[in-house]
């Protein structure tokens, strides 16, 4: 198993959206990334970044920065593959900055929860901007619905971490030759989120959001796993990026 971190650009939000109620009016630029896993049982992607045209049209205040090399096809090319070769993809949730590359994955099977899909298609009013990128989804595309913790493949496990959205999920990967890795999605924005257990300012359920942070920390202790937050430039800069990889 080889695990590649895909550089899919960056955006800006207020720090109070990273740590609820703190430092209102402080803009923060944060990375957006995906995870490509080349596995003996198939090729998998976890999160696909944002679509630049969509963000410029609908959320320009997020100040997107994305070069042509930071699109999903170009990042996969660094890994020696193409979108057409991907077998399965999973989004931690369907907010716009995690689904932008889905449009390239028409041959792949989407693995998701029916509850998250319903939220994408019929969002609550306060979630409409978060779930604003819907063009990639069409009826009839291959979908496998899972509602509980789910084994994707040997050493790849999805586990439920709702709160940020109704059916947010995180990924535990156990590559050979290194510590297991937990890709937390937006259940954990930053290391400070973990340390202080302060949830993000955008969420569906604040109680579940705190429980999700604690569940991730418990999983990390159980598996001796390293936690990979979703949106922190300092930690992102310290990791390997494609074409470098983790695993064998």
Image (cartoon, rainbow, N blue to C red):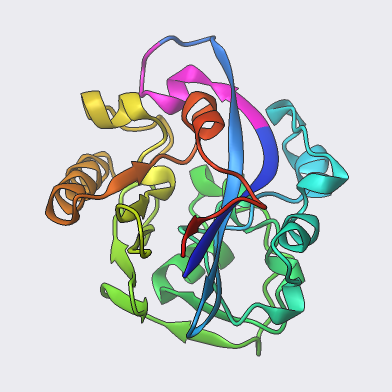
Which of the 4 image quadrants contains residue 112? Answer: bottom left
- Counting the numbered discs, the total is 0
Q: Is residue 25 visible?
A: yes
- The x, y position of residue 85, in whole percent, is 70, 80
In this rendering, position of residue 170 left or right of residue 60: left
Which of the 4 image quadrants contains residue 166? Answer: bottom left
In this rendering, position of residue 190 left or right of residue 109: left
What residue range appears in magenta? 11-22
Q: Residue at x 40, y 30 (%)?
A: 190
Q: Residue at x 33, y 43 (%)?
A: 227
Q: Is residue 55 magenta?
A: no
Q: Residue at x 76, y 69 (%)?
A: 104
Q: Is residue 15 magenta?
A: yes
- The x, y position of residue 127, in whole percent, is 51, 47
Residue 37 versus residue 17: which sits nearer the camera?
37
Q: Is residue 147 visible?
A: no
Please say if 79 is above or below 69: below
Residue 151 versus residue 169: which sits nearer the camera?
151
- The x, y position of residue 200, in whole percent, is 38, 32
Residue 243 versus residue 167: which sits nearer the camera?
243
Please say if 232 is above or below 1: above
- The x, y position of residue 246, in whole percent, is 48, 55
Q: Residue at x 35, y 53 (%)?
A: 181
């Amino acid at each position: 198993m080889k695990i590649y971190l895909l550089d899919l650009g960056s955006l800006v939000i207020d720090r109070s959206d990273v740590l609820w109620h703190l430092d209102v009016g402080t803009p923060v630029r944060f990375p957006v990334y995906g995870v490509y896993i080349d596995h003996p049982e198939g090729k998998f992607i976890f999160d696909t970044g944002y679509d630049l045209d969509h963000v410029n049209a609908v959320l320009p205040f997020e100040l997107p920065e994305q070069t042509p090399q930071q699109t999903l096809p170009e990042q996969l090319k660094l890994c020696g593959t193409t979108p057409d070769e991907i077998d399965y993809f999973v989004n931690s949730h369907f907010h716009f900055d995690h689904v932008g590359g889905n449009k390239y994955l028409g041959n792949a099977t989407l693995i998701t929860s029916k509850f998250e899909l319903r939220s994408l298609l019929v969002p609550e009013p306060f979630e409409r901007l978060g779930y604003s990128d819907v063009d990639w989804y069409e009826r009839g595309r291959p979908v496998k619905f899972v509602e509980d913790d789910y084994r994707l493949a040997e050493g790849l496990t999805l586990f439920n971490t709702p709160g940020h959205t109704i059916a947010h999920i995180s990924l535990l990967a156990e590559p050979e030759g290194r510590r297991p890795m937990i890709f937390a999605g937006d259940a954990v924005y930053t290391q400070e989120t973990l340390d202080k257990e302060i949830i993000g300012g955008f969420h569906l359920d604040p109680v579940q959001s705190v429980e999700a942070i604690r569940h991730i920390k418990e999983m990390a202790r159980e598996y001796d796993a390293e936690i990979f937050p979703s949106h922190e430039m300092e930690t992102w800069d310290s990791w390997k990026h494609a074409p470098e990889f983790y695993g064998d």
